[in-house]
Amino acid sequence: MAGSGVHSYHPVLNASSGTGYVTTVGGLNSYVSGSHLVPWAIVLMSDIYGYKAPNFRNVADKVAASGYYVAAPDLLDDDPFDDNDVNRPLDVWLQDHPPENVSADVKPVIQDLKRRGFSRIGIAGFCWSGIGAADIAKTKLVKASVLSHPSFVQVNNFRGIKAPIAIYGGQNDTMTPPPRIREIERFLRDARPKVTYEVKIFPNVEHGWTLLYDPNDPKAVKAADKAHRMMINWFDKHVKN
């Protein structure tokens, strides 16, 4: 998302990017990757740029390479945010894509995966979809949830969390600054019944760093990969086991 404390890199969308393919899951076009023979599936929910962003699909492929079937649905109805559309700034675009609707839109995807035999499912939300990952963690649909640089979240979004939840923030993130992340962490620490959680604030990174990075910048790639690996480790711990 544009602004101070936010990465300035914007993806060039590519419908043919990634090593997977697009199919229908839960009634939504979805980029899928990995073996359908394993019992573990991960649902990845994109940021405002949608499921055709190459870096996002790269994350899906990376998770799949760790032994998961990955489904990354098009939750934006083929209408990603366009930085060049001056007549439709972010606040206007969000009226058509309220983040509060994400969890309802993704539930059919999870339910479809369960019907296909995936008995243990995890979910991750990036930026715009982070609030949806928190909402789904309040249900019994998933075994674990991860939020990477979530937007629009407040403490109240974490009341009633049931599934193990990880939250990754950035030191220089102005969308969801570290003090808010720490406030959420304190709430999760004191929650009753107890909640299994992990909170990490990554140093020297801005909002969106796990997806909005220049793939030709080794430092940016390394910072993003560290967060990706932590996410996969969280799923390994709570989805595979």
Image (cartoon, helix red, strand yellow):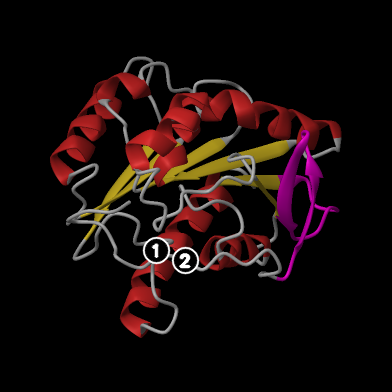
**Which residue lies most toward the front here?**
87
Left or right: 217, with 182 as reference point? right
Instruction: Where is residue 110? Give x, y as percent.
Output: 70, 33
Q: Residues within 10 Å of mark 1 (few under 14, many from 20)?
A: many
Q: Earlier in the sequence, mark 2 or mark 1?
A: 2
Q: Is residue 192 above or below residue 27?
A: above
SS class, disc 2: loop
Q: Label 1: which residue?
A: 212
Q: Quadrant of residue 134?
A: top left
In this rendering, the label closer to the viewer, 2 or 1: 2
The circle on residue 11 is 2
Residue at image location 38% in from the left, 35% down from the top:
92
Is 155 in front, or is 173?
A: 173
Instruction: Where is residue 195? Give x, y as percent.
Output: 39, 26
- Total residue callouts: 2
Q: Quadrant of residue 219?
A: bottom left
Q: Are marks 2 and 1 in contact (CB under 8 Å)?
A: yes
- As for residue 108 lying within the magenta part, the answer is no
Q: Is residue 50 above or below residue 206?
A: above
Q: Is residue 241 visible?
A: no
Is 16 in front, or is 234?
A: 16
Q: Is residue 214 above or below residue 36?
A: below
Instruction: Where is residue 115? Give x, y as percent.
Output: 84, 31
The three-letter code of the residue at mark 2 reads: Pro
Residue at image location 49% in from the left, 30% down from the top:
96
Magenta range is 19-40
- As for residue 32 lying within the magenta part, the answer is yes
